[in-house]
């Protein structure tokens, strides 16, 4: 039996890393302009004409190119537009800061494991930007966060939560950029 050459292994590894990036961006490039419709609730619903969030853009990045390429980042078109506008506005006001967009839902909505919600295109997991102990921008979705699926806050040596006031301010900035387009109920 012939052993795979180093070139073949490098090609296979490259395809494993590049493939999801191409597919994730391809979903956005090939997306149509049909208006979205949400039916039912976030816990029992569906989505008609869901639209993918771009994996990267001003003020945001995807949590996973693989997740995006598998179709786990579709939302209602109005939600997509509001998020992209808000991310860009925060990025312009705070250079170097970016939100990490987690899972949102399937193109047609419906059950979305492991979430109990995310079924009608109106649910989005957003990981807010933080600062490290020296005050530098830091991505919240690090390997430490990956171990808890990104839902656990980081703590300092004394057990204090890092970045709480900044995170709350970022959410306030997103809320201020919410538009009157029928999705204002996203904010409590």
Image (spheres, grey):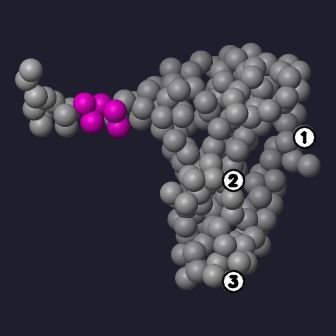
Q: Is residue 85 above or below residue 163?
A: above
Residue at screen point 69% across, 83% down: 158
Alpha-carbon neighbours of circle 2 within 10 Å: few (<14), some, or many (≥20)?
some
Front of the two marks 2 and 1: 2
Residue at screen point 55% across, 82% down: 134
Instruction: Give me the disc on residue 185.
Output: 1
The image position of residue 181, as x and y in percent, is 84, 35
As drawn, the residue found furthest toward the front would be 1
| Magenta span | 12-17
Asked whether 175 or 133 is in front, the reply is 133
Q: CA distance from mark 2 to mark 1?
A: 23 Å
- In the structure shown, which secondary structural element does the residue marked by tag 1 occupy? helix
- In the structure shown, which secondary structural element does the residue marked by tag 2 occupy? loop
Among the two numbered marks 3 and 2 on one chain, the one whose residue lies closer to the N terminus:
2
Residue annotated with mark 3: 158
Task: State left or right for residue 65 relative to residue 123.
Answer: left
Q: Quadrant of residue 101?
A: top right
Front of the two marks 1 and 3: 3
Front of the two marks 3 and 2: 3
Residue at screen point 55% across, 67% down: 138
Residue annotated with mark 2: 151
Alpha-carbon neighbours of circle 3 within 10 Å: few (<14), some, or many (≥20)?
few
Query: Is residue 54 visible to us here?
Result: yes
Task: State left or right for residue 63 relative to residue 79.
Answer: left
Asked whether 61 or 184 is in front, the reply is 61
Task: State left or right for residue 10 relative to residue 117.
Answer: left
Instruction: Give me the disc on residue 28.
Output: none
């Amino acid at each position: 039996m012939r052993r795979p050459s180093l070139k073949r292994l490098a090609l296979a590894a490259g395809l494993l890393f590049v493939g999801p990036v191409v597919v994730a961006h391809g979903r956005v490039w090939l997306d149509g302009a049909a208006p979205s419709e949400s039916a039912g609730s976030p816990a029992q619903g569906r989505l008609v004409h869901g639209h993918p969030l771009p994996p990267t853009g001003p003020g945001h990045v995807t949590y996973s190119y693989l997740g995006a390429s598998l179709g786990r980042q579709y939302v209602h078109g109005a939600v997509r537009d509001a998020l992209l506008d808000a991310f860009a506005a925060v990025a312009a006001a705070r250079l170097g800061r970016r939100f990490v967009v987690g899972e949102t839902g399937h193109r047609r909505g419906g059950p979305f494991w492991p979430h109990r919600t995310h079924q009608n295109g109106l649910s989005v997991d957003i990981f807010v930007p933080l600062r490290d102990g020296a005050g530098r921008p830091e991505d919240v979705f690090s390997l430490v966060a990956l171990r808890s699926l990104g839902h656990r806050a980081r703590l300092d040596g004394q057990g204090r939560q890092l970045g709480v006031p900044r995170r709350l301010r970022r959410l306030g900035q997103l809320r201020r950029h919410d538009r009157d387009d029928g999705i204002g109920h996203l904010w409590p």
